[in-house]
Amino acid sequence: MHASSRARMKNPLITVLTVAVLAVGASIGLSLLWRTDDTEASRGRVVSLMPPVTETLYEIGAGDQLVGRSDWCNYPPEADGLTQCGSALTPNHEVIVRLNPTLILANNSNATARDDLRGLGHAEFLPWLSAEDMIASTRRLGQLTGHVEEANELADEMSVVLLQPQPATGPRVLLVMLPEPGKLEPVSFMRRNSVHGQMLYPAGARNAVDEDVSGVPEISMERVIELDPDMIIMLGIRDDLQESERRQMIEQWSRINPLTAVKEKRIGVLSGRHFYGAGRRLLRAVKELGAEIERLGHEQP
Amino acid sequence: MKLKILLLGAVSIAVVAVSPWLGQSLDGDSGRFILLELRIPRVLMAVLVGGTMSLVGACYQTIFANPLAAPSTVGTTAGATLGALAAVVLAPALHLSAAGGIPLTAAFAFAGALIVSFVIAAIASSGRARVNDILLAGIAISLAAGAVSAGLQYSADQLQLYAAIQWTLGHLPQVGYRGVAMILPFVLATWAILLANTRGLQTLLGGEERAHSQGVNVPRLRALVLGIGALGVGGCVAWCGPIAFIGLIVPHIVRLTVGGSRRVMLPMSIVTGAGFLAGCDTLSRLAWPGRELPVGVVTSAIGAPLLVWLVVRQKR
Amino acid sequence: MSSLELRDVTVTARGKALVENVSLSLHAGEFVALLGPNGAGKTTLLRAALGLVPCRGEALLDGRPVRDIPARERAGLAAWLPQQSHVAEPVTVYEFVKAARYRFAETSAEAEREVVAALTKADVLEHLHHPVTELSGGELQRVGVAALIAQDAPLLLLDEPANHMDPSQQIGLYRLIAGLWRDGRGVLCITHDVNMLRHVGSGDVRVVGMADGRAQFETSFSADNLPEHVGRLFNVRMDVVQSNGQRLLVPQGTA
């Protein structure tokens, strides 16, 4: 006993390792005692922590079931009257509990908050990255709120417009987020497998960045020159973009003169909250984008 | 006297934090749920995490004889951050999801904290490295972790990235007692073993070589404290994310208030750290109605000026 | 009986020998003064004896290699008063001396009794609750000696204990150390000042000279050849003066 205890004392790393193994075991054992039970979904009191979900719920006629929204859900204007519940990243648990929700809707990110939200009531985590995600989630929202028909109708409309393969020919468009005035970089582009990327195909255009990019969707100006897109279109979120600002944004690109799009003046700006919205508002944005691509394609310097 | 004030203050903060008087009332079913399933677990979490971070900080400051030593400067937190980010990158590649009900980010963060601390503990126990070298190595690892984390954001899948960002924000709020149950074994083991080494740490105050001559196995003690400290901090940050500043500030506040005797300072670091984090968390809940500030923002905003004030007052 | 035995000890740092082939022994009940100019390797030798630096040759405590003895057990064989009592934090004298009781498994009350006894013996009890950082150099060294008493080891290794003290403090300190010697402890004391050994009192004090990392001579304090050896060690001429029946060595410029 004495000899063995001294041997253990001699190597502190072994002591630490022993304690670590015991603690991990105890930790897993204890955590199993507190598994969150999933409750049944029921209609009536919905908290949405995702702006496009909030918008879609109003669109399919389920807006009256909403009692809470995220801090960022600002459309439609009726949503203003709902209780703010923080964001999906940092939900305010106490506020959500006070709303006594029967359904909590959030993004399907793989984070701990999932378990926490499940502890507050029935929670559903909806994918919303690609057009396919958006359409499937819209149908799911119909099932959850009892507005199946309206949801399916909207989903079908979106499918017709957005679920198209990338055309084999057509202009190669670099679709980017409208940068801050006075600087072009970072160039934040729309991925080809995202809702916004897929908005190009109905207009017969291709995505200039024709590859899957993980991580932050940014590319360097060198890469832009290498890709040499036929058109560059910037998408802003402001409803009140002035014509002078629009011109200034286009003017900024003139420094990058090796670009064909710059030489041929095929650079456009579209701005409005609907470009980053959902539902039929987004379909309107698709039309506007198509018209802009058409205009830039015809206009000759 | 000062000791009693600190003790009383810390305990009353923890009590007030769960009390129904702050914020909205706690009536009815939802009030009961808020108290039992949200507020009490949250304050318990703050008590466990705050106490552990502070105790480990106090012990690190002793073994390194350096006031800048803390879980965040010897690389423990950085290791956890690296681990959390590794989970982000590796999970899709390995087709892993939650392991044994434990979120993957937490499991990897824990492993990261432990691996980095073991490397540092091994360097420390070899007896070849000087104290400041170890601290420097820890800071280098912290900086490297920051760089790697920024780099990873450019290669990670969007949803995984979201999970990592959520982890790095640090979160005490939670629903139910699962998190408390999960960190409890780590916290209790850490408190017990570190407090059991109070005499050795106290002896170390007279200088490393004198302590050696007085019978302290200095490399062993250093490696043990580093390793066990990493275990406790790893357990805490794996679940809650890195919570800034507390392991650095609280030991100083305690030392400047009740003196440097480790017999008093170590247990008081637990009490003060627990009260401090519970208080900061309550403020983060109330400061901005309807919203929650990350608790790390509050710990830094309160802790940093408090520390400066105590140091300046001491110098006069 | 406890003993320190150094055999052909060599300590090298960055390829340079700080101590070279030094042999020295100390038994309980002996007083050895280690004499030599600055940089002679005296402190390094003591650190090797404590196992603080690795060395070639043999450093034995009670016949066992010092690096193999468990720390607590080693602390029961030899206690050390380092040259500089640098303490980073303002710990109280009580806490400082109590640290020397580390090797004992005892209650706080028992430790407190021993600390008070040691401080009483060193005549610094009035500082019990003062921070060590606020003591004068002389007081701090006496507190250091109190810590040695509290550690209760049969061998004491002292590194220039009377540095930075005024003459009366120096004499008081040497008398205190001599008392510990007379209680049966073995004392190894590094010093520059051979005359101070007068205050150790009667008994056989061995004097070992060290320069450039090597042992130069070993003789007794009362031996006739001491002035000659010491003069050569410090590279000065030593005159001998009698005062109150005691021999004083007075340095007289370069030899």
Image (cartoon, coloured by chain):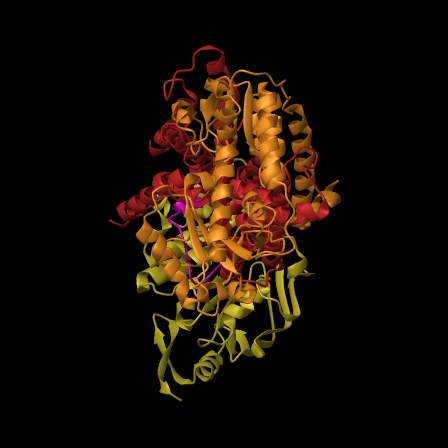
Chain colours: A orange, B red, C yellow
Quarter assignment of residue B280: top left
The residue at 31%/63% (across/down) is C166
**Rendering coords of residue A111 (x, y %):** 58, 37
**Residue lying furthest left in this view?**
B316
**Rendering coords of residue A270 (x, y %):** 43, 48
Quarter placement of the C terminus of chain C: bottom left
**Rendering coords of residue C200 (x, y %):** 44, 63
**Rendering coords of residue B156 (x, y %):** 60, 50
- Residue C82 lies in the magenta-colored region: yes
Query: From which residue to which does the magenta span run?
Result: C81-95
Residue B207 seen in the current view: no
Compare residues A224 and B237 and report the one nearer the observer.
A224
**Residue A282 in the figure: left or right of residue B288:** right
The residue at 43%/85% (across/down) is C235
Compare residues C14 and C234 and report the one nearer the observer.
C14
Compare residues A258 and B76 and report the one nearer the observer.
A258
Quarter placement of the N terminus of chain C: bottom right
**Could you tell me what secondary structure mostly forms the magenta stretch?**
loop
Residue A180 seen in the current view: yes
Quarter assignment of residue C241: bottom left
**Residue lying furthest bottom in this view?**
C255
- Residue A214 lies in the magenta-colored region: no
Compare residues B19 and A53 and report the one nearer the observer.
A53
Above/below status of A130 relative to B17 = below
Counting labels gives 0
